[in-house]
Image (cartoon, helix red, strand yellow):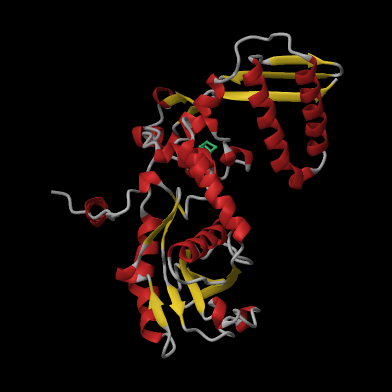
Amino acid sequence: MRISIKDMADRHVAANQKHWSHDRRTTVGASEAFLCSRRTAYSKAETAPDPDYEDRYGARVRGDLIENHFWEPAIRGQKPEGVQFLFAGREQKTLVDGYLSATSDGLLVGVAPDALAHLGVPDLGPASSDGNTLVVECKSIDPRVSLKEAKAEHSGQTQVQMGLIRHCTPYRPNFALLSYADASFLDTITEFAVAFDPAVYAAAKERARRIMLAEEPTELPPEGKIAGGEECRYCAFKHRCQGAIVTSIPRDSVPIGANALAHLKALTLQHEQADSEAETATHRREEIREQVRVLLRELGTRKVQGDGFVISWFPVKGRKSLDRKAAERAGLDLAPFEREGDSSERLTITLS
Ligand code: SF4
């Protein structure tokens, strides 16, 4: 029988999945709150992942190992005298506020007001308003990633942690210490101070509410795609999401009313403006394109020709490509491994 440590590691991880007392299908977790909302909705609906999706566990296991065997014991053993370390390790708590939840990394209670002075925060606030408390957040990071500032999704996640601790416990932390341990060299730890922002917490709650109350994931905007598609590369529902977009293209071109025409013309003009503003405008451009898609869908038309502008939307057949890895394994006869990609769409918005 073949002996492979990789095989055994795979089986070990599969047999030792984390069990949560909280039903994670019923809330949006802190780490999901600022991901693509459609992706999170697919996940909450327990949608089957794409057949070719591979669930890589490496980063998840790495994070757990570092948190449980390095980060948490280091804080617990070395925190200043008189400081308590709550809601961490075996005392981790899953906190819930409406449709939003988080499993805490930890809270330090009894810290000095200047605990984050080295990070540019001279005072955490008076003890009477819980300035003696500090949320601590554990992350590990690939050393190739540049860390000039905390990653936006981690800042958002940390805001959710702080908000939920404020909501669910007697503590009202004003700051968090977000730490990144370099996954190759654990003695390289980069830290950021994060000030609590009630507006970010409120936004996370609202996002969670919209995700959990959506009847269909496709009701939610494809935010990964709008943001440029980077998140889509790791999404388990990429083909499903793309297929839903293509099949939602109206079949016909029909006359539309003056208001809709004016609206679409305005969107076309905005689209042109955005197009000329290079990289910073790219995000906005995709949002407008999505508004156009939604409107065409609502109007039931795939083509609009107005006073000086044309919009058309149609499915595009996927390109044929070769699965070269499989072909190499099998020899030089590549033809049997040809496969057809997902259908895609093309939305053109031009002034005429
Ligand atoms: S493919 Fe992209 S846009 Fe669609 S659900 Fe996944 S992350 Fe969101």
- Residue 339 vs residue 17, the one in the foreground: 17
Residue at horizontal 55 percent and vertical 51 percent from the top: 204
Side of 74 where 322 appears, left or right = right
Which quadrant holds residue 220?
top right
- Residue 263 vs residue 55, the one in the foreground: 263
Residue at horizontal 63 percent and vertical 82 percent from the top: 123
| 246 vs 90: above or below | above
- Residue 51 vs residue 157, the one in the foreground: 157
> Does any portion of residue 310 appear in the rendered image?
no
Could you say where residue 106 lies in the image, as x and y percent from the top left?
42, 71
Quarter of the figure with the C terminus? top right
Could you say where residue 350 lies in the image, as x and y percent from the top left?
80, 24
Could you say where residue 273 lies in the image, as x and y percent from the top left?
83, 36
Could you say where residue 130 lies in the image, as x and y percent from the top left?
53, 77
> Does any portion of residue 144 appear in the rendered image?
yes
Give the residue at the far left of this rendering: 1
| 312 vs 149: above or below | above
Which quadrant holds residue 304?
top right
Which quadrant holds residue 196?
bottom right
